[in-house]
Image: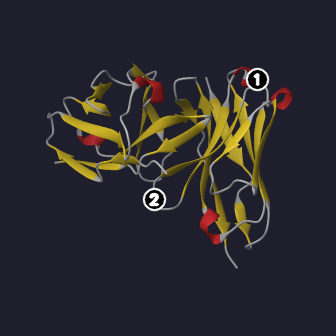
Amino acid sequence: QVHLLESGGGVVQPGGSLRLSCAASGFILGSYNMHWVRQVPGKGLEWVAFVRYDGSDKHYADSVKGRFTISRDNSKSTVFLQMNSLRVEDTASYYCAKDNYWGFDHWGQGTLVAVSS
Amino acid sequence: QTVVTQEPSFSVSPGGTVTLTCGLSSGSVSTNHYPSWYQQTPGQSPRTLIYGTYRRSSGVPDRFSGSILGNKAALTITGALADDESDYYCMLYMGVDIWVFGGGTKLTVL
């Protein structure tokens, strides 16, 4: 059974950094592209970042480009999101999602990031 | 910048049929956008309903179906149940490894 478990969220000051992790189980992570998606409380979903199955290609939403870095360690079945220069508007729940080529077929439970002074 | 559009809200009677749509501020939605649909209730993670325009995710009842209607992607719910009251998001693949969500539709069943 596919399971995605995010961790690493918390409270951070503006300008600070956090590293989110997404531990995958129930499937071979190295065979699938993966994504991070976020949701500001009470608002809609926003796609944040993509990493190809082998880590060879990465893409970002304009809102986080240059500040966030997605990576993966297939040997540890984990996907990461390094978030630097955090802003108040980055406050959101962050979900990792598994890509099945046609869309996202599994989601984690999310981890909450709060950027506040 | 192209915006993915959805109805902000919709209402359906129990047992009724409703079609939610997903369009583009500029241009038409096609199967090349790999439209997908996600259901979310407050406090929960999104649940995948449909991917690749019409492919139903594992465990999703066949009351949910996806299609292209005219120049938009569509999610049709037949025989609506009270449990279907949720937020529904569509997502489109915009090419060059970029994905965009619509703003979501709040569905009320009453």
| Front in this rendered view, residue B44 or A59 | A59
Q: Are marks 1 and 2 in contact (CB under 8 Å)?
A: no
Q: CA distance from mark 1 to mark 2?
A: 32 Å
Question: Which residue is depicted at the point 47% across and 53% down?
Answer: B43
Left or right: residue B67 compared with residue A18 = left
Residue A50 location (% of width, % of height)? 67, 38
Question: Which residue is depicted at the point 58% across and 23% down?
Answer: A100
Left or right: residue A13 compared with residue B77 = right
Structural crowding at the residue carrying mark 1, measured as other residues with C-alpha within 10 Å and reported as few (<14), some (14–19) or many (≥20): some
Is residue A57 among what the camera can see?
Answer: yes
Figure check: A39 above or below B98 = below
Residue A20 location (% of width, % of height)? 74, 50
Tell me, yes or no, whether dots 1 and 2 are on the same chain: yes
| Residue ID for mark 1 | A30
Is residue B65 among what the camera can see?
Answer: no
Element marked by disc 1: helix
Marks 1 and 2, the one that precedes in the sequence: 1
Element marked by disc 2: loop
Q: Quadrant of the N terminus of chain A?
A: top right
Residue B35 location (% of width, % of height)? 43, 31
Residue B59 location (% of width, % of height)? 42, 22
Structural crowding at the residue carrying mark 2, measured as other residues with C-alpha within 10 Å and reported as few (<14), some (14–19) or many (≥20): few
| Front in this rendered view, residue B76 or A67 | A67
Q: Amino acid at mark 1?
A: Gly
| Front in this rendered view, residue B22 or A112 | B22
Q: Chain of mark 1?
A: A
Left or right: residue B102 compared with residue A47 = left
Figure check: B19 above or below A81 = above
| Res. A43 mark | 2
